Amino acid sequence: MDPELFNQLDPMYYGGFLQIRNNDTTLTEDINLKINQFERAFENAIDYYSPNIISDLSPAEYDSIQNAISRRFPLQYSPNNFYKSYIYYTMASLERVVLQKNTDSLYRKYLDNEYLLYFNPAYMNFFNEFYDHYLTTSPRINQKELMDCINQEGTYRPLFNLVGKDPYLVNERIRELVIIEDLAEIYGNKRFNKKNIEHILKEIATTTHFSEHQIIAKNILASLHPYQESNTISFEGMKTASGASFNIEDYKGKWLYVQIFNTSCEDCIREMMIIKDLQQKYKDSITFVSLSIDFNFGHFIQFKEHFPQFDWTFVHFDHQYPWIDELQITTLPDNLLFGPDGKLVKRDAP
């Protein structure tokens, strides 16, 4: 797709998201079309054979669903085929509901192999269900030794060797991923030393032989406390409505409130009416800035011209998409409060 045309599409105009699909119905091998067809059939089979709660699914009902699916879709282990693996591990998640207590059977059938399908959502969904809070719940891992390993040793290799005694963690690739994900899960548990957890994750990120794990460990480290008190946030590359560079350093000495908005967001405009009153009342001690994440810069300029009563600083994010991801901006309006020293005081500020 032409990048210029794509940049003109504003997801907010379409209700918050865009879906791109192929209109050529003759492309029967299109992966998205095939998966959508499978998911519809899968949901219909569940509704027909198990109209109540899925957790009450009986073995007979599961067999009926499996038979209904297998008549139309391939049910086979094929790790190098994304489509077949998607179907296979979607059914695996359903089978796990039926065989929750028979973990050995599930492990041998679905996980005891050389492949770890990081980029297949059905596989990763099953993987995360199977290993959810595994380190702290497995009867094959001594919990006292686990706590000592994290709280006293605080290094990766002893932990790696300890949990490797579990037969479901013999595979070193699986073992390391489970350690990474479970360390993130227990990070908020007061029984475990947070600093040591961070140190182990950093050690994995720098020493792992698996490139995927380096990325995952770094992402988890960034998510543990991305924007706590005393953090600084860069606004590099962003421009004001007049075209000048926006630099947070220019606002030191006062409190700074940054409202993140989109010109299609009605709640954002209502909030601006409140900001207008607050600005007049507290202008000597706090500065307000509204930061637009409109995809179309023209819409941003037109909005500023249409609402001259909003006379504080307006900034455009200038298509800094990684910045949106870093701050995990998922709803609007969103707000940041900075102290006079330029450091973040409150994420999701009221």
Image: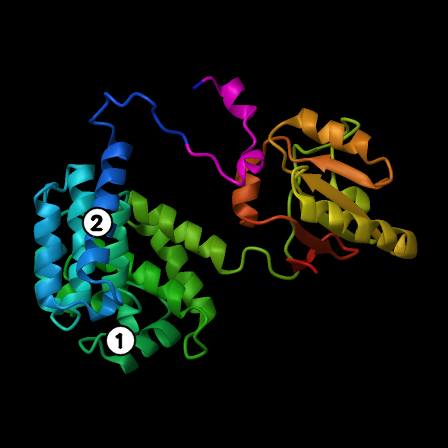
Q: Position of residue 324 (x, y in %)?
A: 56, 42
Q: Residues within 10 Å of mark 1 (few under 14, many from 20)?
A: few
Q: Position of residue 44 (x, y in %)?
A: 23, 50
Left or right side of 108 for 193: right
Q: Earlier in the sequence, mark 1 or mark 2?
A: 2
Residue behind mark 2: 42
The correct choice, above or below, for 278 with respect to 321 in the image is: below
Q: Is residue 107 visible?
A: no
Left or right side of 319 for 58: left
- Relative depth, front residue between 81 and 66: 66
The correct choice, above or below, for 25 with respect to 60 in the image is: above
Q: Position of residue 225 (x, y in %)?
A: 53, 60
- Helix, strand or loop at disc 2? helix
Q: Residue at x 64, y 31 (%)?
A: 318
Residue behind mark 1: 137
- Helix, strand or loop at disc 1? helix
Q: Amino acid at mark 1?
A: Thr
Q: Is residue 13 magenta?
A: yes
| Residue 60, quarter of picture | bottom left
Placement of the N terminus among the 4 image quadrants: top left
User: What's the CA distance linking mark 1 and mark 2?
Assistant: 31 Å
Q: Residue at x 26, y 75 (%)?
A: 137
The correct choice, above or below, for 215 with respect to 80 in the image is: below
Disc nearest the viewer among 1 and 2: 2
Placement of the C terminus among the 4 image quadrants: bottom right
